[in-house]
Amino acid sequence: MALEPIGLCGKPLSGKNVFASVLEKEFGYEVYEISTPLKRVAYTLFDVPFAVWTEDKKEAYLNIYLDDFVGINRIGLEVNDEGQITYRSLLQILGSGVLVKHAPTVLIGLLSQAIRGSQLSVAVPGVRSDSEAQVIKGFGGTIVEIVRPSVKDAHTHKIERGISRSLIDHTIIAEDIEDLKAEARDYARRIRADS
């Protein structure tokens, strides 16, 4: 039986994907990343391979320059002295600069389809907007905030500002990755025991 979907929010590099990975590997959850369609667009338009979307490479600079994008809000984007942007910034441009601006319901619709179409419980790392959280809650899901005090708040792009506190059901604080994995296991066991 599928359990409620779980949306994971928090600062960049807080461990949302680590938490989701524990749910997937140890408890049979399906992981749906809202950014996957954007990664496909990045691959199609800019030949960015899927292998770069790991935590240690999201912050790397690629051979794409901010000046190549006309009319994009530059506030909060990571740009080096040569004007190159990071992989994360490319997703921010594609997500908030293109889709949210010109087709705001596309990612929400894809999220809804993924939850509705799954036979498994779904974990969604990277919930960044109130509307994404509301879709998850609409399917009876919960929103879990991941907090790692050691992670600095270096990302100022508007998409990284977080969701409304009123939409967050639980906050998990972990000092390091191993603590976070243990918290994910405990959380999943509590959900199973309650269902």
Image: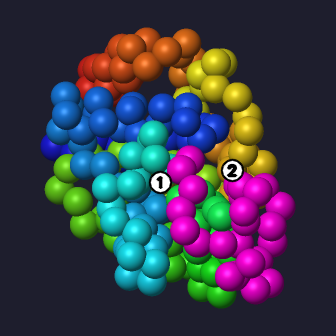
Q: Quadrant of residue 68?
A: bottom right
Residue 82: in magenta span: yes
* Residue annotated with mark 2: 160
Look at 25% across and 66% down and name the residue there: 117
Q: Position of residue 172 (x, y in %)?
A: 54, 22
In this view, the residue farthest toward the front is 82
Discs 1/2, front: 2
How many C-alpha atoms fall within 10 Å of the one at disc 2: few (<14), some, or many (≥20)? many
Q: Position of residue 190 (x, y in %)?
A: 34, 20
When the figure is inspected, residue 30 is found, relative to residue 129, above or below; the finding is above
Specify start and end residues of the magenta stretch as a single range: 59-83
Q: Position of residue 122 (x, y in %)?
A: 31, 49
Residue 172: in magenta span: no
- Magenta: main secondary structure: loop
Disc 1 + disc 2, Cβ < 8 Å = no
Q: Nearer the viewer, residue 86 or 169?
A: 86
Look at 81% across and 72% down and name the residue there: 73
Q: Quadrant of the C terminus?
A: top left
The amino acid beneath tag 1 is Ile
Q: Quadrant of residue 130?
A: bottom right
